[in-house]
Amino acid sequence: MSGDVWVVAPLVWLGAGAFIIYLVSRIITERNGWLALCTTLIFTAALITLVPLALSTRHAVQVSNPLPTWGSTEPGSVRMRSDPGALVIVATALGLGILTSIYSGRYLSRDPRHKLYYPLLLLMVTGLCGTVLAADLFNLYLFCELMSIAAYVLVAFRRRSDKAIEAGFKYLIMGSVGTLLFLTGVAFIYRAQGTIALPVPSVAPANPLKLWTRAGLAFILVGLGVKSALVPLHTWLPDAHGRAPSSVSALLSGIIIQSAFYALLKVSLGTGMSARALGGILIPVSIANMTLGNVMALVQTDTKRLLGYSTVAQMGYIIFGIGVGLHYAIPEAIQAGFFLLVAHAAMKALAFLSKGVHRFYLDANSIDDLRGTAFQLPLIAVTFTVALGGLAGVPPLAGFISKWFILGEVLQPGEPLAYVGLAIFLLNTLLALGYYLPLVARLFVLPHHHTGSTMERVAISAWMAVPLVMGAALVIAIGLYPGPWWTWVDGVGPYLLGR
Amino acid sequence: MPIDTQTIGLVTILAAPLATAVVLFLLRGRSIRFAGWIAGVSAALSLAAVLAMLPALYQGEVPTLSMPWIPAAGIELGLHVDWLTLPFLVTEAAVTLVAIAYSWGYHRGDERSGAFYGLLLLFGLGMSGTTLADDMVLFYVFWELMLVASSILILLWGEGEERGPIALKYFIFTHLGSLLVLVGLIALYDATGTDSFSALRAGVSLSPGLTRMVIGLFLVGFSVKMAVFPVHLWLPDAHTVAPMPVTIMLAAAMLSMGTYGILRFPLSIFSRADVASFALPMMIAGVFSEVYGALMALAERDIKRIIAYSSVSQMGYILFGLGTLTADGITGATLHVIYHAIVKALLFMGAGWVIKSTGRRRIGELGGLAKKMPWAALCTGVGALAIAGMPPFCIFDSEWMIFSGGFHTAHIGLSVITLLGSLLTVVYAAQLIIGIFFGSPPEGLTVKKPHWAIVAPTALLTALAFIEGIFPAMLFDWVVRELPLILGGRW
């Protein structure tokens, strides 16, 4: 056991934090606010431990030193490695963790079982960090399961409602099938290559791949495809993200499926699949994702299901950027995809958290229930509008500048496939206006049967207002001043392309 | 970035409305009584700052402001004023001011007034920002701000039950045009590696196929904003439903943004040879739009819709003038933007005066108002004569130039059709005036006394339509100076 301890520091800290929180809730206090505060502190500390890791990873990328690694190469030992993409995802997840745990300080106050919620939240993020940091297939599998199991439970957290149980169960079944396929794929690859180590893409075994490796890769693509909601394996997502508590949906939609997708990239490229072939698979998938997501979102009547389908569509945009980048070897296109990933995390989390406030104070769930709520919850109407405007790509918010980058980079190669994808991308952008705009409009127009008594302003708790204002500021900041964020994700493209 | 008077002026054009809008949003219900006044002062300040650019421009300078924004991607934040910008900038700032002044009389004060005036300012800011922008990202940001602000205005203050769907239709339809423009912009950005207009003017090397594609995208995209047939479908509904001050801004100023886009991108960046193959399609589309808009105006009964369709027709003249690719045609098209702004605002104001006084808006339900409202009849009558191209009112001058441009091309036949098509304008203009002001008044038509803030701007524009018709020299001088910036400057 040797190497850079900072690689496992966030994992250890979060994992330990889960138990600490549980003990705190059993021994010291059960007050929801205190538990939320402690969880926030744990997430913040984990984010701080990430700083030295980020610095050393960046340094390693720039001078082509080996990336920071922890653990021995023997089978069965824990082996972790930091890389630029993993860092982006872990940092985003921890950032969202901070926002949602503050938010939960009020949002969870009516749930009797909140003392289980915080450990589960921490375990889910632990699993997420492990998934993207793992340097061999076995650990990747374990952490991916940890993340998924915590997520299943959190989706069904409000177990009084049948629908939550149903959604959680569906997620569990589909997720387990995905895991099973993934495990089969790992077995095949182990049979073919005799190792489960996951090298960095630049030193991955060269072509041609053995038949067993190909079969294994196919299983892994489908298995992780379920977890990252690639169409047509996305069917669990609208249910799960629509029924989970909003604070959980924010994490699920914002970063969980993206981390599974990153694992998919890492495994395929690490086991020797060529970037060109992977990109060639991802481009059609991305087109299916954006088209189906947008069309289905148009016909939704429940706000959170709508947001769930919007995630399917936005995943399509992200994968489109990354897929074109891999296929035509354009690091900037991958960079643009990751930029949207970060921006989408902020926007989607903000949207779910804003929606949660409506549910918490007004019991508003369907899109029609939101009518005129701007008069009762003006602040939330503004944050919700910022989130939805960003998702629709209205300048100067984060979503617009992301699309600008993706469009700009995707046009670079001048290939027919990229042009076709681009045309579909733009049509989708237009299609998406058809559900984002009416949603925004509904917030501000008076209800059908407007009676004076129901329109009084509702005071919202600071626990909720603070993360929402932070999130909205983030969405605006990324849109207005994208420079630092753009530079932040610049290592991912060269890393995945094996340069 | 040196701080001098030019920089201060440039920043003021945008900062005055922005700051005021923010203040009005923050004050919310507390600003009912003074929101309109603050907004008016702010719009006047913005207009003054625009006019303050004139001395520098006459001395041959180009007031510019530039700072790095996203260095990693070569994106800068730049503003500049040149002779191509100025006519549009003046039009937008002046129309915003006039529309706000008109709102004092037209808009009933309530607790949302602050937001109303704030959004009007943001709408104006979007337009002047689009014209001032010297880089693509900023251009597109302001371009969309204009759309967002105007959609919200239609959604929240529109007239009639259909305003929600119509605001949505307006947004999606014009956003489609914006996306085409966006693709064109990004193709140029990829070709040059920078997003500044100055770099684009220095020359772009694209393959012939890509050049044609980019020019085509720009022309179609900007035509949506101009509301040229057949991509005009958003216009009649949006103009009819929008509250009158917003309609004035939409028709008089926002439509011209499409013209600005065509002048700024395809015509400025590419050479005459690249654009030449698009000249005839532009002229034909212009003629179609002119005739179609006029026929639809003839068929309509709602006075707002008649004037709205007349915009489709007038934008046809402008596209025709641009398509001639002659000095006269392009000068005429730019002049037509300004004169159309004056006359269209005047017509809508006259219509608003009538609607506000009588509470009716359909031709059959109005009539014989000339005796009861002589001043409204005079102002609207001048507007109608002007839109029909009668001398000595201003549109006569710009149409003259456009037709002259047409006769300089090889397509004399098309030019003759355009000229004859303008006869239809006379018919619908006459129908509008006769339907409202002459004949026998229908039963139960009562007339309320108008607010002074409705009368004063209308009278001002009436005078302007007349004065500009007789003394167009100054504006001519401004507009002609844009020519060296277009088509490589060789005429």
Image: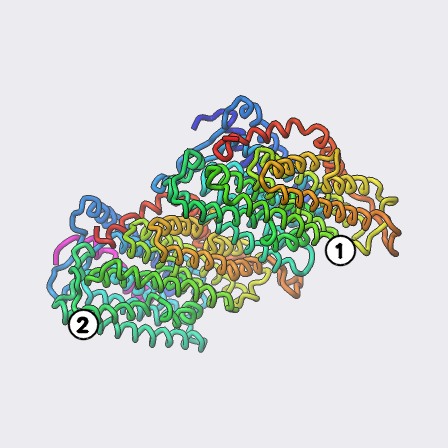
Q: Secondary structure at mark 2?
A: helix
Quadrant where the N terminus of chain B sits is: top left
Q: Does A255 sit above or below residue B259?
A: below
Q: Secondary structure at mark 1?
A: loop
When asked about the image quadrant of residue A312, the answer is bottom left
| Residue A360 percent coordinates (x, y) | 50, 64
The residue at which mark 1 appears reads as B301
Residue mark closest to the camera, 2 vs 1:
1
- Determine the residue positioned at 53% across, 56% down: A381
The residue at which mark 2 appears reads as A188
Labels 2 and 1 within one chain: no
- Left or right, B64 with respect to A284, comes to right
Q: Which stretch is magenta?
A: A1-28
Q: Amino acid at mark 1?
A: Arg
Is residue A302 something one can see in this rendering?
A: yes
- Determine the residue positioned at 14% across, 64% down: A77
